[in-house]
Structures are given as C-alpha cells and as structure tokens.
Amino acid sequence: MMTYSQFTQYVELHIREYVSEEMVVSSKIWQQKNNGVPIEGLVFKDTGALVDMPVMVYFKDLYERYCRGDASINSFLQETVNELSNGVSTKFRDSFKDRIFFRIVNAEKNHNKFFTSPCRQVGDFLVEYRLIAFQNEFGVGSMPINNEMAKNIGLNEEQLYQLSMKNTEELFPVSFENLTTIKDSIQKTGQIPSGHEIRADKNDEWQVYTLTNKVGLNGASTILYPQVQEDLKREFPNGYYVLPSSIHEVMIVDQSFVQEPLDLFMLKEAVLSSNYQVVEPSEFLSNEVYEAKGPDFQLERTTFLNHKKEKNMER
C-alpha cells in the first residue's frame, strides 16, 4: 500500500493519462477550506461547460478511498476519473436549484466569507451555501457558492437560504440516536446505527443524543432544520442543551441533566476536551454550549454565572 506522499506524487504524475481532451485537471493547494485550513487537491474543469465552475477534489479524501479498496492504483484512478468526469460534465446540464444545500461553520473563523460569498450569520454560526457536483459511491462532492457563481445562477442570498433550507432537509435527512444505543451497537456490531426520527425515550438511562444526518457529513446543520426544531421542542418541552461536536454533528442533552452548576461545567468541559483532543481543525464548529427553552425555544449561548475562569483551551 502506498504512503500518502507516494500516492499524491503518483496521482499528480499520472492523472492526466485518464482524462478526456475536454477535461482539464491540475493540482492545487486550497487555502480557504473551512476555518482557513489549507489542503491539497485536484481541480477538474470541463472546457465545454456553460459556466466556469471547476470542481475541487481533496487528496486526503482520494487517499482514504484508495486505502479502503483493493483495486490497483491505475484501476482506482480510471474509475475515479470516470465518476468525476461524469459529475463535472453533467452538473451544468441539470437543474442548479435541486443541488443547492447549506451547512453551518464557525462564524468568527470564517468571517472572510462575508466578502466573497453569499451567506448569513445565525448566532455564532455562519450559514454558507454549496452546490453538489456529484453524489455516488465515492461520497458527496460539492463546491462553495461564491458571489460570481450566485450571480451566474441568478439567485440572491435570501433565495439561496430558502431554497437550500428546503433542499438540505430532503438531501440529507436527519439521524437522531441515544448515545447509549450508539455505544452498545458499536460494542456488539462494530457499526454506528443510522438513527431514526427524533424521539426521546424518557426511560433512556442517559438523556443524551446525537443529532446529525444519515450521511454523517455536515450534520450539525440539522439543528437549523425547521422540522427538527419543532420535534426537539416537542420531545424536550422543558428545554435542552446543544453541544457542538463538530460541523458534522451536535449532541442534544435534556435540560434535566443539569441539576446544579457543576453539571453545566461538565458539559462545557466535554465540548472543550472534544475540540482540543479529537476534532480536526477544519471541522471545528464552536467551543460554546447552547440551550433552547421556552417560550420561543431560540438557540442561545448558555450563560455561566459565578464560575471560575475557563481554562485556556483556544484552538
């Protein structure tokens, strides 16, 4: 099995042997992935496309797919190029509107996107819009919608927000599961259950749940789904806490978990520890704990009163 360095070098040298004359491919270091973390990848561009919107594919993702399979490197490149070429060449012939979705990222770390892309801030989060390039056995490939692309598509920010809110719920349906159930499933089968509709069993030993989507990609965005907010309000009528695990999921904790200030500090420590030790920098969402409670159940930062100075665990 090739190392990551060997893989990227081989791909850069041989990838052009597998693309058609209409397809242009080049290597690039992408400087503006989420939270400003640079990452290497390939840029695919269809010279016959109606709109100039190339697709970026990350070397990290390609290498992970290569390691999971058993095909030779040459067979892998041929299959990958075929899939990507189809996605790049057809995305402009299909409707744009049913491919637009949104995700949430940390607003402070991505403030520069306000100048380059249509987006909006919701609390501590930035809602950004993306366009699906392909969705198949290789996963989901998407690109951010910048100002130029939005202009070419002919949609303003409000239109993108309304459209993406509808699409995202349909494209990435919610997955909700009790944390104890997940742990038991991993121990027994080695797999994470896919989850189901939002139902909180009051008999659960731990009133702690994971909220994501069935793809497990950009799943923290589900916290903004209107139907999810209504379901959470129904299942947790006394309120609930939201712990941002990453851009891919959040944890939902029943309000009854917090009986005294120390319990709230435990939730805060859980978020900080996860971000400091586990979460990739590009997948960081927030260090805060949030809560939603009556009468309007608006998601807000949890207020810590009379507490000691927090540990300095800034990323």
Image (cartoon, rainbow, N blue to C red):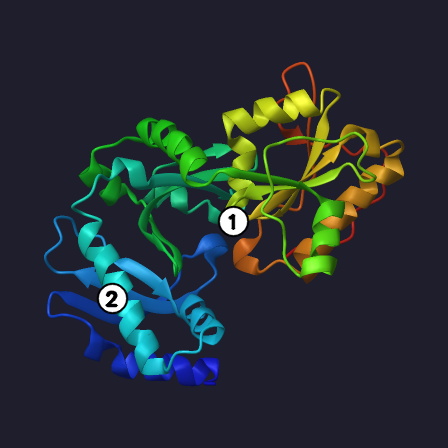
What label sits on residue 82 in the rendered view? 2
In the image, residue 25 above or below residue 258: below
Q: Nearer the viewer, residue 283 or 11?
A: 11
Q: Amino acid at mark 1?
A: Lys
Task: List x then y, in percent, for residue 122.
Answer: 51, 32
Q: Amino acid at mark 2?
A: Asn
The quadrant where residue 131 appears: top left
Find numbered disc 1 in the image and state the secondary structure of the residue it sits on.
Answer: helix
Answer few, some or many: residues within 10 Å of disc 2's Cα (few below 14, many 20 plus, some between 14 and 19): some
In the image, residue 103 above or below residue 23: above
Query: Which corner quadrant holds the C terminus?
Result: bottom right
Q: Nearer the viewer, residue 95 or 47?
A: 95
> To which residue does mark 1 refer?
109
Residue at image location 24% in from the left, 39% down from the top = 96
In the image, residue 124 above or below residue 110: above
Q: Nearer the viewer, residue 63 or 307?
A: 63
Q: Nearer the viewer, mark 2 or mark 1?
A: 2
Answer few, some or many: residues within 10 Å of disc 1's Cα (few below 14, many 20 plus, some between 14 and 19): some
